Image (cartoon, rainbow, N blue to C red):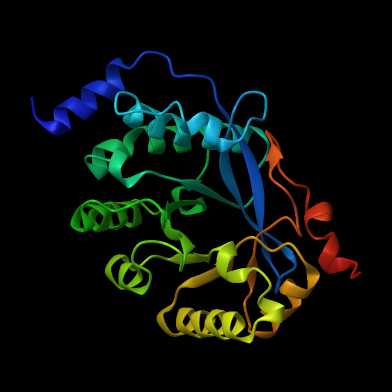
Amino acid sequence: MSPNATACSTCRTAKPLFPFTMAFQPVIDLQEVRIDAHEALVRGPGNEGAASVLAQVNAGNLYAFDQACRVKAIELATRLGIDCQLNINFLPNAVYEPSACIRQTLAAARRCGLAPNRLTFELTEGEQVVDLAHTRGIFEEYRRQGFQVALDDFATGYSGLSRLADLRPDIIKIDRALVQDCDRDRVRLAIIASLVRLGGDIGIKVVAEGLERREEVEALRVTGLRYMQGFYFARPVFEGLAPSGSALAGLLCPA
Protein backbone atom coordinates (compact mmCIF):
# COMPACT_ATOMS: atom_id res chain seq x y z
CA MET A 1 0.00 0.00 0.00
CA SER A 2 1.31 3.47 -0.89
CA PRO A 3 2.09 6.04 1.87
CA ASN A 4 -0.76 8.20 0.57
CA ALA A 5 -3.25 5.36 0.77
CA THR A 6 -2.01 4.46 4.25
CA ALA A 7 -2.47 8.02 5.46
CA CYS A 8 -5.93 8.31 3.93
CA SER A 9 -6.96 4.99 5.46
CA THR A 10 -5.69 6.17 8.85
CA CYS A 11 -7.95 9.23 8.73
CA ARG A 12 -11.00 7.18 7.68
CA THR A 13 -10.61 4.31 10.12
CA ALA A 14 -9.05 6.04 13.14
CA LYS A 15 -10.56 5.21 16.50
CA PRO A 16 -12.04 8.14 18.44
CA LEU A 17 -9.25 10.49 19.44
CA PHE A 18 -8.39 11.47 22.97
CA PRO A 19 -10.45 14.47 24.15
CA PHE A 20 -9.14 17.96 23.42
CA THR A 21 -10.49 21.43 22.82
CA MET A 22 -9.24 24.96 22.03
CA ALA A 23 -8.32 28.25 23.62
CA PHE A 24 -8.17 31.44 21.56
CA GLN A 25 -5.73 34.36 21.78
CA PRO A 26 -6.27 37.62 19.86
CA VAL A 27 -3.90 39.31 17.43
CA ILE A 28 -4.18 43.10 17.76
CA ASP A 29 -4.13 45.68 14.97
CA LEU A 30 -2.60 48.75 16.63
CA GLN A 31 -3.34 51.05 13.73
CA GLU A 32 -7.07 50.33 13.68
CA VAL A 33 -7.23 49.60 17.45
CA ARG A 34 -9.13 46.36 16.94
CA ILE A 35 -8.77 42.59 17.09
CA ASP A 36 -7.45 41.41 13.72
CA ALA A 37 -7.57 37.66 14.37
CA HIS A 38 -7.92 34.95 16.98
CA GLU A 39 -5.37 32.12 17.06
CA ALA A 40 -6.69 28.67 17.99
CA LEU A 41 -4.44 26.90 20.53
CA VAL A 42 -5.01 23.26 21.43
CA ARG A 43 -5.87 22.49 25.07
CA GLY A 44 -6.94 19.51 27.12
CA PRO A 45 -10.61 19.24 28.16
CA GLY A 46 -9.79 20.68 31.60
CA ASN A 47 -7.67 23.51 30.15
CA GLU A 48 -4.50 21.43 30.34
CA GLY A 49 -1.63 22.86 28.28
CA ALA A 50 -0.88 21.96 24.68
CA ALA A 51 2.02 19.71 25.72
CA SER A 52 -0.33 17.32 27.52
CA VAL A 53 -2.38 16.94 24.34
CA LEU A 54 0.52 16.70 21.90
CA ALA A 55 2.13 14.01 24.07
CA GLN A 56 -0.73 11.74 22.98
CA VAL A 57 -0.08 12.24 19.27
CA ASN A 58 1.78 9.43 17.53
CA ALA A 59 2.35 8.05 14.05
CA GLY A 60 -0.93 6.16 14.22
CA ASN A 61 -3.16 9.17 14.93
CA LEU A 62 -1.14 12.11 13.52
CA TYR A 63 -3.21 12.51 10.35
CA ALA A 64 -6.54 12.22 12.12
CA PHE A 65 -5.42 14.60 14.88
CA ASP A 66 -4.37 17.31 12.40
CA GLN A 67 -7.73 17.05 10.64
CA ALA A 68 -9.69 17.05 13.92
CA CYS A 69 -7.86 20.14 15.20
CA ARG A 70 -8.86 22.16 12.14
CA VAL A 71 -12.49 21.13 12.37
CA LYS A 72 -12.64 21.72 16.16
CA ALA A 73 -11.13 25.21 15.78
CA ILE A 74 -13.59 26.20 13.03
CA GLU A 75 -16.66 24.80 14.76
CA LEU A 76 -15.85 26.25 18.17
CA ALA A 77 -14.78 29.67 16.89
CA THR A 78 -17.93 30.11 14.82
CA ARG A 79 -20.10 28.90 17.71
CA LEU A 80 -18.45 31.60 19.84
CA GLY A 81 -19.28 34.22 17.22
CA ILE A 82 -15.86 35.03 15.75
CA ASP A 83 -16.11 38.07 13.48
CA CYS A 84 -12.51 38.34 12.22
CA GLN A 85 -9.70 36.12 10.98
CA LEU A 86 -9.17 32.64 12.48
CA ASN A 87 -5.59 31.36 12.70
CA ILE A 88 -5.02 27.60 12.91
CA ASN A 89 -1.68 25.82 13.37
CA PHE A 90 -1.04 22.87 11.11
CA LEU A 91 1.48 20.04 10.82
CA PRO A 92 2.93 19.87 7.28
CA ASN A 93 4.14 16.34 7.84
CA ALA A 94 0.51 15.32 8.51
CA VAL A 95 -0.59 16.49 5.06
CA TYR A 96 0.15 13.79 2.49
CA GLU A 97 -1.80 15.33 -0.43
CA PRO A 98 -2.91 18.97 0.00
CA SER A 99 -6.09 18.95 -2.07
CA ALA A 100 -7.33 15.73 -0.43
CA CYS A 101 -6.36 16.63 3.13
CA ILE A 102 -8.09 20.01 2.97
CA ARG A 103 -11.53 18.59 2.17
CA GLN A 104 -12.67 18.19 5.78
CA THR A 105 -11.51 21.74 6.53
CA LEU A 106 -13.42 23.15 3.56
CA ALA A 107 -16.52 21.16 4.50
CA ALA A 108 -16.37 22.43 8.09
CA ALA A 109 -15.93 26.02 6.91
CA ARG A 110 -18.91 25.75 4.55
CA ARG A 111 -21.02 24.10 7.24
CA CYS A 112 -20.20 26.89 9.69
CA GLY A 113 -20.52 29.72 7.19
CA LEU A 114 -16.86 30.74 7.46
CA ALA A 115 -15.39 32.01 4.17
CA PRO A 116 -11.98 30.53 3.23
CA ASN A 117 -10.38 34.00 3.14
CA ARG A 118 -11.02 34.29 6.88
CA LEU A 119 -8.79 31.28 7.61
CA THR A 120 -5.02 31.50 8.10
CA PHE A 121 -2.90 28.38 8.52
CA GLU A 122 0.29 28.80 10.56
CA LEU A 123 3.38 26.67 10.05
CA THR A 124 5.56 26.72 13.16
CA GLU A 125 9.25 27.38 12.46
CA GLY A 126 10.12 24.69 14.99
CA GLU A 127 8.27 22.12 12.86
CA GLN A 128 11.04 20.62 10.76
CA VAL A 129 10.18 20.58 7.06
CA VAL A 130 11.16 17.14 5.79
CA ASP A 131 10.23 17.85 2.17
CA LEU A 132 10.45 21.49 1.12
CA ALA A 133 8.79 20.93 -2.26
CA HIS A 134 5.88 19.19 -0.54
CA THR A 135 5.45 22.04 1.95
CA ARG A 136 5.59 24.58 -0.86
CA GLY A 137 2.86 22.59 -2.60
CA ILE A 138 0.71 22.80 0.55
CA PHE A 139 1.12 26.58 0.66
CA GLU A 140 0.23 26.89 -3.02
CA GLU A 141 -2.88 24.73 -2.68
CA TYR A 142 -4.06 26.60 0.41
CA ARG A 143 -3.72 29.91 -1.39
CA ARG A 144 -5.60 28.47 -4.36
CA GLN A 145 -8.45 27.61 -1.99
CA GLY A 146 -8.48 31.21 -0.70
CA PHE A 147 -6.68 30.64 2.62
CA GLN A 148 -3.75 32.68 3.95
CA VAL A 149 -0.56 31.00 5.18
CA ALA A 150 1.84 32.14 7.89
CA LEU A 151 5.25 31.23 9.28
CA ASP A 152 4.96 31.13 13.07
CA ASP A 153 7.85 31.54 15.55
CA PHE A 154 9.85 33.26 12.83
CA ALA A 155 13.60 33.86 13.37
CA THR A 156 14.06 31.04 15.88
CA GLY A 157 13.56 27.97 13.70
CA TYR A 158 15.58 25.78 11.39
CA SER A 159 15.98 27.98 8.34
CA GLY A 160 14.97 31.60 8.98
CA LEU A 161 15.16 33.79 5.90
CA SER A 162 15.77 30.90 3.51
CA ARG A 163 12.41 29.39 4.48
CA LEU A 164 10.79 32.78 3.93
CA ALA A 165 12.29 32.94 0.43
CA ASP A 166 11.28 29.37 -0.40
CA LEU A 167 7.71 29.40 0.94
CA ARG A 168 6.63 33.04 0.37
CA PRO A 169 4.04 33.20 3.20
CA ASP A 170 1.39 35.90 3.53
CA ILE A 171 2.35 36.49 7.19
CA ILE A 172 5.38 36.04 9.42
CA LYS A 173 5.04 35.97 13.21
CA ILE A 174 8.18 37.07 15.07
CA ASP A 175 8.86 34.81 18.03
CA ARG A 176 8.93 35.96 21.66
CA ALA A 177 12.59 34.97 21.87
CA LEU A 178 13.44 37.92 19.62
CA VAL A 179 10.74 40.29 20.92
CA GLN A 180 11.54 39.92 24.63
CA ASP A 181 13.06 43.09 26.12
CA CYS A 182 13.40 44.67 22.67
CA ASP A 183 12.93 48.07 24.34
CA ARG A 184 16.20 47.50 26.25
CA ASP A 185 18.20 45.93 23.42
CA ARG A 186 18.93 48.05 20.37
CA VAL A 187 20.19 45.03 18.39
CA ARG A 188 16.91 43.12 18.84
CA LEU A 189 14.93 46.23 17.99
CA ALA A 190 17.01 46.90 14.87
CA ILE A 191 16.48 43.31 13.67
CA ILE A 192 12.71 43.61 14.16
CA ALA A 193 12.66 47.00 12.43
CA SER A 194 14.46 45.45 9.45
CA LEU A 195 11.85 42.67 9.30
CA VAL A 196 9.08 45.27 9.35
CA ARG A 197 10.72 47.06 6.40
CA LEU A 198 11.25 43.76 4.60
CA GLY A 199 7.59 42.85 5.08
CA GLY A 200 6.57 46.17 3.56
CA ASP A 201 8.93 45.70 0.62
CA ILE A 202 7.69 42.20 -0.29
CA GLY A 203 4.06 42.51 0.79
CA ILE A 204 4.08 40.28 3.87
CA LYS A 205 2.20 41.08 7.08
CA VAL A 206 4.50 41.08 10.11
CA VAL A 207 3.16 40.12 13.56
CA ALA A 208 5.13 40.24 16.82
CA GLU A 209 4.30 37.50 19.33
CA GLY A 210 4.79 37.28 23.07
CA LEU A 211 4.31 40.94 24.04
CA GLU A 212 4.18 41.14 27.84
CA ARG A 213 5.11 44.74 28.71
CA ARG A 214 3.92 48.17 27.60
CA GLU A 215 7.53 49.23 26.97
CA GLU A 216 7.92 46.43 24.42
CA VAL A 217 4.69 47.48 22.72
CA GLU A 218 5.76 51.12 22.50
CA ALA A 219 9.23 50.25 21.20
CA LEU A 220 7.73 48.11 18.44
CA ARG A 221 5.11 50.71 17.61
CA VAL A 222 7.95 53.14 16.80
CA THR A 223 9.35 50.66 14.24
CA GLY A 224 6.04 50.81 12.39
CA LEU A 225 5.00 47.31 13.42
CA ARG A 226 1.21 47.20 13.27
CA TYR A 227 0.18 43.71 14.47
CA MET A 228 0.95 42.28 17.92
CA GLN A 229 -0.05 39.33 20.10
CA GLY A 230 0.74 38.45 23.69
CA PHE A 231 -0.21 38.41 27.36
CA TYR A 232 -0.02 42.21 27.50
CA PHE A 233 -3.24 42.31 25.48
CA ALA A 234 -4.91 39.04 26.49
CA ARG A 235 -4.03 35.54 27.62
CA PRO A 236 -5.53 32.63 25.68
CA VAL A 237 -9.20 32.26 26.60
CA PHE A 238 -10.26 28.67 27.24
CA GLU A 239 -13.16 27.85 24.89
CA GLY A 240 -13.83 31.57 24.51
CA LEU A 241 -12.90 34.72 22.62
CA ALA A 242 -11.32 37.71 24.30
CA PRO A 243 -13.79 40.62 24.17
CA SER A 244 -12.47 43.64 22.33
CA GLY A 245 -12.63 45.83 25.42
CA SER A 246 -10.37 43.62 27.53
CA ALA A 247 -7.89 42.85 24.76
CA LEU A 248 -7.49 46.52 23.85
CA ALA A 249 -7.62 48.03 27.33
CA GLY A 250 -3.87 48.61 27.40
CA LEU A 251 -4.05 50.65 24.22
CA LEU A 252 -7.20 52.58 24.98
CA CYS A 253 -6.27 53.31 28.60
CA PRO A 254 -2.48 53.80 28.81
CA ALA A 255 -0.90 52.99 32.15
Q: Which residue appears at 69% of the width and 64% of the height?
A: 211
Quadrant containing the C terminus is: bottom right
- Residue drawn at the location 71% of the way across and 79% of the way down: 183
Point out residue 85 in the picture as x, y percentages from the top left corner. 57, 53
Q: Answer above or below: position of 233 versus 193.
A: above
Establish if 40 lies above or below 174: above
In the rendered image, residue 6, in percent from the top left (x then y), is placed at 17, 26
Q: Is residue 231 left or right of residue 207?
A: right
The answer to whether one can see residue 97 in this image is yes
Q: Position of residue 190 (x, y in %)?
A: 57, 86
70 is higher (above) or lower (below) than 177: above
In the picture, measured across the screen, residue 131 lies left or right of residue 195, that is left
Left-right relation of 137 to 116: left
**Residue 111 in view of the camera:** no
Q: Quadrant of residue 221?
A: bottom right
Q: Residue at x 67, y 24 (%)?
A: 46
Quarter of the image that includes the N terminus: top left
The residue that appears at 40% across and 80% down in the rendered structure is 202
Q: Is residue 165 left or right of residue 70?
A: left
Counting the numbered discs, the total is: 0
Give residue 31's position: percent from left, percent from top: 70, 74
Asked if residue 111 is positioned above or below residue 232 in the image, the reply reads above
